[in-house]
Amino acid sequence: MVGASSLQPRMISSFVGDRLVQSRQPLSQLFNYNPGCQHGSMQLSRTFSGLTNLLFNRRSNLEEVPNSKRKCLRPGKLSPRRLVPNHIQRPPYVKTRMAPGIASGPEVHDLKGIECMRASGRLAAQVLNYAGTLVKPGITTDEIDQAVHQMIIDNGAYPSPLGYGGFPKSVCTSVNECICHGIPDSRPLEDGDIINIDVTVYLNGCHGDTSATFLCGDVDEEASNLVKVTKECLDKAISICAPGVEFKKIGKTIHDHADKFRYGVVRQFVGHGVGRVFHADPVVLHFRNNDGGCMVLNQTFTIEPMLTIGSINPEMWDDNWTVVTSDGSLSAQFEHTILITEDGAEILTHCED
């Protein structure tokens, strides 16, 4: 997806597999971009030859993080794909097994659609809250995936990540230096880890998308401060949302707050419209930008800033999903799905205590 004034590479989070790349082809041809429109539609698929190599560095061979006793993440073993009962409604992309990319046009809802979004957001929040209670030293990310999967299907919903562009699991679990899209596996969490759990559910034809970073055991001050400030960035960004507000104010708000603590803001992954489809317009940038577009009443989209202590440059594993910081430094993320209301924004994925 290309903004009218920001034609640099970026990747859509949480699960859009299509990636913008530098190319000798004119961008207007590569992405069907019309200079008279705010956004163009991406036509490249995840299977495009060499695409990820153009945008991301590949995983390094570091064993330990520089200037730290913490070991670099390494992939564990994957369990078999989990089953979903036949009676549960599936998103259309599950049948095609291809990532559909960004749907053009914003997600704007009538009263019935708003109630549907509230229901899916509420369930996603409850699942994330439950997943957070499981975080402790010794539990594997695969065990978290199993619990999340079971809770989602027990509530008659489908785990949106499962089968999206070939993603093999029902939730993303991104530990320590993992920026996003970590695949749950056999690695047990260790004391002092931080972990982002990204939950999306598909309920009654609507997606609810949310994530949070949790502390595992005794976490040091450096890591806990990063998590705290990342959450503050999301909260501050939501607080300025309302009808008519320019989307670029979200990026400025987040970037300004992150700068106060000298944290980096990841640029390749962005928020997105969400609702009847998993990913739709607008592209929500988390850094300072000059992109156009304003929020409209009854619109739903995500804000999901990712901050780092060190490098903001992404490095992709050979699984074509897991993305980590190039220097092994910690990364944290928080995400909510919000609804633009007459007097501001309603957080659809807020979990009532």
Image: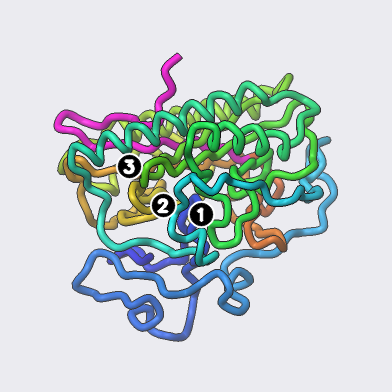
- Proximity of marks 2 and 3: CB atoms separated by less than 8 Å: no
- Residue ID at (33%, 80%): 28
* Amino acid at dot 1: Phe
| Tag nearer the camera, 2 or 1 | 2
Quarter of the rendering occupied by the N terminus: bottom left
**Gap between marks 2 and 1 measured at Cα:** 8 Å
Task: Tell me the crowding category of disc 3: few under 14, some 14 to 19, or many 20 or more residues within 10 angstroms, Cα based.
Answer: many
- Describe residue 343's horizontal placement relative to residue 324 as left or right: left
Residue 278 disc label = 2
Residue 65 visible (yes or no): no
Between residues 22 and 299, which one lies in front from this camera angle?
299
Which residue does the numbered mark 1 point to in the structure image?
15
- Proximity of marks 2 and 1: CB atoms separated by less than 8 Å: yes
Tell me where residue 298 appears, x and y as whole percent.
20, 40
Which callout, 2 or 1, points at the residue further toward the start of the chain? Answer: 1
Which residue does the numbered mark 3 point to in the structure image?
250
Is 154 located above or below residue 186 in the figure? above
Tell me where residue 133 appears, x and y as whole percent.
62, 21
Number of marks drawn: 3
* Amino acid at dot 2: Phe
Task: Tell me the crowding category of disc 2: few under 14, some 14 to 19, or many 20 or more residues within 10 angstroms, Cα based.
Answer: many
Residue 217 visible (yes or no): yes
**Gap between marks 2 and 3 measured at Cα:** 21 Å
Which callout, 1 or 3, points at the residue further toward the start of the chain? Answer: 1
Q: In the image, which residues are magenta? A: 331-353
Does the stretch in magenta take in 319? Answer: no
Tell me where residue 92 appears, x and y as whole percent.
43, 59
- Describe residue 162's horizontal placement relative to residue 187 as left or right: left
